[in-house]
Image (cartoon, rainbow, N blue to C red):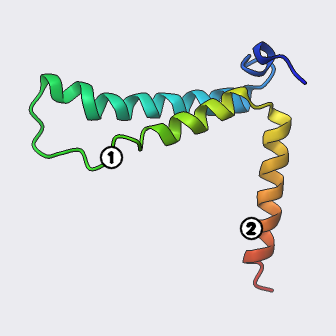
Amino acid sequence: MADIGTNINPKHNPVTTLLGGLFIIISAAMYVVKYIIPAFVVLKQDIPYEWWLPMIPLIIGLLLVFMTDEYFAKIFNRVDKIAGKKTDTN
């Protein structure tokens, strides 16, 4: 089992750490747009998503940050094989 500090280090696992960070930033931006900006600016229309929706990219981001690139490659290859079988039209 790898050390948590090693998993979140972008030098050891650059793909999952950077993708996870991107998902966390998206989640933070969604939260800011939904709750922080309306405190200072009157919006012309309501934000169309529910309170729990920013949690989805946050959870995905945290899973990716703590996942190793090897697990990510295995999952991606498995999904690619499944998608290849279902979309093969020959």
Q: Nearer the viewer, residue 13 or 31?
A: 31
Who comes first in sequence, dot 2 or dot 1? 1
The answer to whether 44 is drawn above or below residue 77 in the figure is above
Task: Tell me if mark 2 has few (under 14), some (14-19) or many (20+) residues whose alpha carbon lies within 10 angstroms of its own.
Answer: few
User: What residue would you read off at disc 2?
Assistant: 83
| Residue in the picture at 42% in, 38% down | 54
Q: Which element is circle 2 on? A: helix
Find the residue positioned furthest to the top. Answer: 5
Which quadrant of the structure image shows residue 18? top right
| Residue in the picture at 77% in, 50% down | 76
Which callout, 2 or 1, points to the residue nearer the camera? 1
Would residue 65 appear left or right of 36 to someone viewing this image?
right
Give the number of callouts.
2
Point out residue 59 in the picture as x, y percentages from the top left corner: 57, 36
Task: Tell me if mark 1 has few (under 14), some (14-19) or many (20+) residues whose alpha carbon lies within 10 angstroms of its own.
Answer: few
The residue type indicated by label 1 comes to Glu
Check the picture and name the quadrant holding the N terminus.
top right
Point out residue 67 in the picture as x, y percentages from the top left corner: 75, 31
Q: Which element is circle 1 on? A: loop
Would residue 71 appear left or right of 21 to someone viewing this image?
right
Point out residue 53 in the picture as x, y percentages from the top left corner: 41, 44
Find the residue positioned furthest to the front. Answer: 52
| Residue in the picture at 26% in, 50% down | 48
Give the number of the disc on residue 86: none
Give the number of the disc on residue 50: 1
The residue type indicated by label 2 comes to Ala
State the CA–CA distance, disc 2 to disc 1: 31 Å
